[in-house]
Image (cartoon, rainbow, N blue to C red):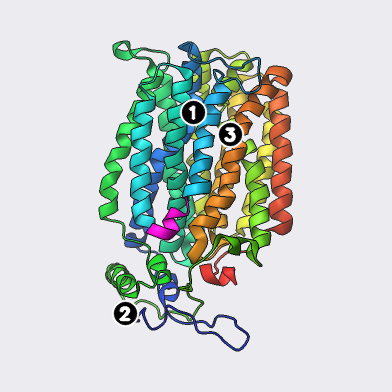
Amino acid sequence: MASLPIGATSVPSHSGTGAPEPTTGVNARIDRLPATREVWMLVFLLSIGGWFEFYDLFFTAYVGPGLVKSGLYATTTASFFGVSGLGAFVAASFAGLFIGTFFLAGLADRYGRRKVFTVSLLWYSAATLVMALQTTAPAINLWRLIAGIGVGVELVTIDTYVSELVPKHLRGRAFAFVHLVQYTAVPAAALLAWWLVPQTPFGVDGWRWVVIIGALGALVVWAIRRRVPESPRWLAQQGRAEEAERVLQALEAKVAAQYGRPLPEPVPTIEPATNKAAFREIWQPPYRRRAITMLVFNLFQAIGFYGFASWVPTLLVSKGVTITHSLMYSFVIAVSNPFGPLIGMAIADRIQRKTLIVLSALGIGVFGSLFATQTSPAMLMLLGVLITLCGTLLSVGYHAYQTELFPTRLRARAVGFVYSMSRLSAMFSGFMIAFALRHFQVPGVFALITFSMVMVIGAIGLFGPRTNNLNLDEISH
């Protein structure tokens, strides 16, 4: 097994043109690793942390009818920004996500992926537990916002973490696997809501039990931090060469033992620079065009994705389905969530990430338009499943894609910045969907979603770069 000192190679040399020269440091050593059980275990452990964040994101849809049933919220309100409407609950979720991704995601660049991963998870868990105990809509909205801050930081940190721990030939499949695990949280939330929301176990509203279960379960992930090391790419970028070397040697030893033969020789490649990054660097070439492209993309993808995912039971009720049957149909649709990432594992590294994003957005637009015209329960469920499969494939594609577009030194900050636009958009989408539903019914909702998907296709299809099977810092240059 070849083990090369990081300290001598972690800072790229420069040619006369100022371009970084390939060396054999941390990037090269990670990118030559085969996909052994140890590599997949690290990805799995990180995805478990994200499972609870996805549970939190998606229980919004399934506890919505329960919040209305309990009298705390109304489905729609007379005013656009009514605080007692279900749109306000959705908006509070995404307001917190926006604060977390825009203002705090950069903490992972400063303090490390591992520490921020742990702290943000505990933040979310505590705030969600407090939220479940509130008795007024404004108080629920406040604690929903606070919990959303932790979720926003966590999701960006996990994406950054995964992209830096896996070799380049595995990134697409790794993100698909992360989403496969994470999206099992959606049918879990839907099943619990179907079972609990119509009831009041021990005299407590069922929606509160759904929330409490997610909050308490997140605490077990504290143990994950013992098994997951700090990102060696981040350590090398920080100039902490000895720590990066220890982490890499331990990882290489485990991978080599499972591989059963010497690891491949690392191929010289561009390594993470140790200079500190300023936020203004995002607005310099080549990052400026990428940042603008991803800002536009995130602005519109959130309307299409969450416009359906966060409103499934409510949209079904609006089409005349009873609350109990709505939750049952929603559960059937939710069960399909993990199958999108399962498909992604087979194709994510075989087709360009941008192509996967474009095709998925096209599917959401087409199937969504058909959903709006249906009344048959079988067709509603079938089209709901197809929309969900396309939505999860879109998620698999863009979560990997946006982490690839920026260098190690500002990856979390840049991803948090562009991703925050989706949170801001989703925050207002709750009010937009409620407005469209009140005045234009379900067809109006899907007209909005289809327009959003057309904008997604234009942004990524025309301006997104290719990234498959390229070293992370090579993409940056």
Q: Is mark 3 on a helix, strand or loop?
A: helix
Number of residues whose C-alpha sits closer than 10 Å to that of mark 1, classed few (under 14), some (14–19) or many (20 or more): many
In three-dimensional space, the C-alpha distance between marks 2 and 3, rounded to whole angstroms, equals: 50 Å
Q: Is mark 1 on a helix, strand or loop?
A: helix
Residue 192: within the magenta? no
| Depth order, front residue of 474/358 | 474
Q: Quadrant of residue 377?
A: top right
Mark 3 sits on what residue? 427
Q: Does the magenta stretch include residue 108?
A: yes
Task: Give the percent coordinates (x, y) of residue 212.
Answer: 34, 27
Q: What residue is shown with label 1?
A: 60
Dot placed on the residue nearer the N-terminal end, 2 or 1: 2
For the residue marked with disc 1, what is the amino acid?
Thr
Please tell me whether the stretch drawn in magenta is mainly helix, strand or loop: helix
Q: Residue 1 shows which numbered tag?
A: 2
Residue positioned 55% across, 25% down in the render: 88
In percent of width and height, residue 445 lies at: 69, 27
Q: Which of 143 and 315 is in front in this view?
A: 143
Q: What stretch is highlighted in magenta?
A: 105-111
User: Label 3 vs label 1: CA separation?
Assistant: 12 Å
Inspect the image, locate mark 3, and give the three-letter code of the amino acid beneath it.
Answer: Met
Q: x, y (%) of residue 410? A: 51, 62
Figure check: 347 above or below 134: below
Q: Position of residue 70 (x, y in %)?
A: 45, 12
